[in-house]
Amino acid sequence: MPTRPAQSSEEQTLRWAARRQSVGARIREIRLAQDLSQEALALESGLSRNMIIGIEWGRKSVAYERLWDIAEVLNVTIDQLMIQPSSGAKSVHYRGGRRPMDDARS
Protein backbone atom coordinates (compact mmCIF):
# COMPACT_ATOMS: atom_id res chain seq x y z
CA MET A 1 0.00 0.00 0.00
CA PRO A 2 1.52 3.34 -1.03
CA THR A 3 1.98 5.87 1.73
CA ARG A 4 3.25 8.81 -0.31
CA PRO A 5 1.57 10.47 -3.30
CA ALA A 6 4.63 9.73 -5.46
CA GLN A 7 4.12 6.02 -4.76
CA SER A 8 0.48 6.04 -5.89
CA SER A 9 -0.66 5.12 -9.36
CA GLU A 10 -2.25 7.80 -11.50
CA GLU A 11 -5.58 5.96 -11.26
CA GLN A 12 -5.44 5.97 -7.46
CA THR A 13 -4.53 9.65 -7.37
CA LEU A 14 -7.49 10.45 -9.65
CA ARG A 15 -9.83 8.31 -7.50
CA TRP A 16 -8.72 10.16 -4.36
CA ALA A 17 -9.22 13.53 -6.06
CA ALA A 18 -12.73 12.55 -7.17
CA ARG A 19 -13.62 11.43 -3.65
CA ARG A 20 -12.31 14.66 -2.14
CA GLN A 21 -14.35 16.70 -4.62
CA SER A 22 -17.51 14.68 -4.02
CA VAL A 23 -17.36 14.87 -0.22
CA GLY A 24 -16.39 18.54 -0.34
CA ALA A 25 -19.24 19.42 -2.69
CA ARG A 26 -21.65 17.54 -0.41
CA ILE A 27 -20.42 19.44 2.66
CA ARG A 28 -20.88 22.71 0.75
CA GLU A 29 -24.35 21.68 -0.42
CA ILE A 30 -25.49 20.87 3.13
CA ARG A 31 -23.87 24.00 4.56
CA LEU A 32 -25.59 26.25 2.01
CA ALA A 33 -28.94 24.52 2.55
CA GLN A 34 -28.62 25.41 6.24
CA ASP A 35 -27.60 29.01 5.46
CA LEU A 36 -24.35 28.53 7.34
CA SER A 37 -21.28 30.51 6.32
CA GLN A 38 -17.88 28.92 5.81
CA GLU A 39 -16.60 30.98 8.71
CA ALA A 40 -19.34 29.76 11.06
CA LEU A 41 -18.73 26.13 10.03
CA ALA A 42 -15.03 26.63 10.62
CA LEU A 43 -15.51 28.19 14.05
CA GLU A 44 -18.03 25.59 15.20
CA SER A 45 -15.99 22.63 13.89
CA GLY A 46 -12.58 23.84 15.08
CA LEU A 47 -11.12 24.11 11.59
CA SER A 48 -9.85 27.20 9.83
CA ARG A 49 -11.95 28.89 7.15
CA ASN A 50 -9.17 28.22 4.64
CA MET A 51 -9.34 24.53 5.49
CA ILE A 52 -13.13 24.52 4.98
CA ILE A 53 -12.66 26.23 1.61
CA GLY A 54 -10.01 23.67 0.62
CA ILE A 55 -12.22 20.76 1.68
CA GLU A 56 -15.30 22.09 -0.12
CA TRP A 57 -13.38 22.56 -3.36
CA GLY A 58 -11.69 19.15 -3.11
CA ARG A 59 -8.21 20.62 -2.76
CA LYS A 60 -7.52 19.43 0.79
CA SER A 61 -7.87 16.10 2.49
CA VAL A 62 -9.38 15.95 5.92
CA ALA A 63 -8.72 13.53 8.77
CA TYR A 64 -11.72 11.31 9.30
CA GLU A 65 -12.00 12.51 12.91
CA ARG A 66 -12.64 15.98 11.50
CA LEU A 67 -15.48 14.64 9.35
CA TRP A 68 -17.31 13.83 12.59
CA ASP A 69 -16.77 17.42 13.76
CA ILE A 70 -18.13 18.79 10.48
CA ALA A 71 -21.08 16.38 10.49
CA GLU A 72 -21.93 17.34 14.07
CA VAL A 73 -22.04 21.06 13.21
CA LEU A 74 -24.18 20.32 10.14
CA ASN A 75 -26.38 18.00 12.22
CA VAL A 76 -26.01 15.10 9.77
CA THR A 77 -24.50 11.63 9.95
CA ILE A 78 -21.14 10.78 8.43
CA ASP A 79 -22.76 8.67 5.72
CA GLN A 80 -24.76 11.71 4.58
CA LEU A 81 -21.46 13.42 3.78
CA MET A 82 -20.56 10.52 1.46
CA ILE A 83 -23.68 10.77 -0.70
CA GLN A 84 -23.12 12.25 -4.15
CA PRO A 85 -24.15 15.91 -4.16
CA SER A 86 -27.48 16.47 -5.91
CA SER A 87 -26.13 19.30 -8.04
CA GLY A 88 -23.30 21.75 -8.28
CA ALA A 89 -23.46 24.06 -5.29
CA LYS A 90 -24.29 27.64 -6.14
CA SER A 91 -21.87 30.31 -5.09
CA VAL A 92 -23.59 32.46 -2.49
CA HIS A 93 -21.56 35.20 -0.83
CA TYR A 94 -22.41 35.96 2.78
CA ARG A 95 -20.24 36.98 5.68
CA GLY A 96 -21.43 36.25 9.16
CA GLY A 97 -22.75 33.28 11.14
CA ARG A 98 -26.03 31.77 10.15
CA ARG A 99 -27.87 33.77 7.51
CA PRO A 100 -31.06 35.52 8.68
CA MET A 101 -34.08 33.65 7.32
CA ASP A 102 -35.52 36.66 5.46
CA ASP A 103 -32.23 37.18 3.58
CA ALA A 104 -31.54 33.48 3.00
CA ARG A 105 -32.74 33.15 -0.58
CA SER A 106 -32.30 36.68 -1.93
Image (cartoon, rainbow, N blue to C red):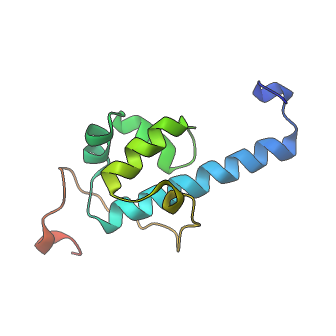
| Viewer-closest of 46 and 104 | 46
- In the picture, which quadrant includes the N terminus? top right
Residue drawn at x 44%, y 44% as measured from the top left? 68
Judge whether 43 appears above or below 91 on screen.
Answer: above
Q: Relative to residue 89, is residue 61 drawn left or right?
A: right
Q: Relative to residue 35, is residue 65 drawn left or right?
A: right
Residue drawn at x 76%, y 50% as measured from the top left? 15
Residue drawn at x 32%, y 33% as measured from the top left? 46
Residue drawn at x 24%, y 56% as measured from the top left? 94
Is residue 7 visible to the viewer in this orientation of the structure? yes
Judge whether 7 appears above or below 93 on screen.
Answer: above
- In the picture, which quadrant includes the C terminus? bottom left
User: Can you tell which quarter of the image residue 52 is in?
Assistant: top left
Relative image position of residue 82 (x, y in whole percent): 57, 58
Relative image position of residue 27 (x, y in whole percent): 45, 56
| Viewer-closest of 55 and 69 | 69
Is residue 91 visible to the viewer in this orientation of the structure? no
Judge whether 102 appears above or below 95 on screen.
Answer: below
Number of marks in picture:
0
Relative image position of residue 72 (x, y in whole percent): 35, 49
| Viewer-closest of 46 and 78 | 78
Relative image position of residue 93 (x, y in whole percent): 29, 58
User: Can you tell which quarter of the image residue 50 is in?
Assistant: top left
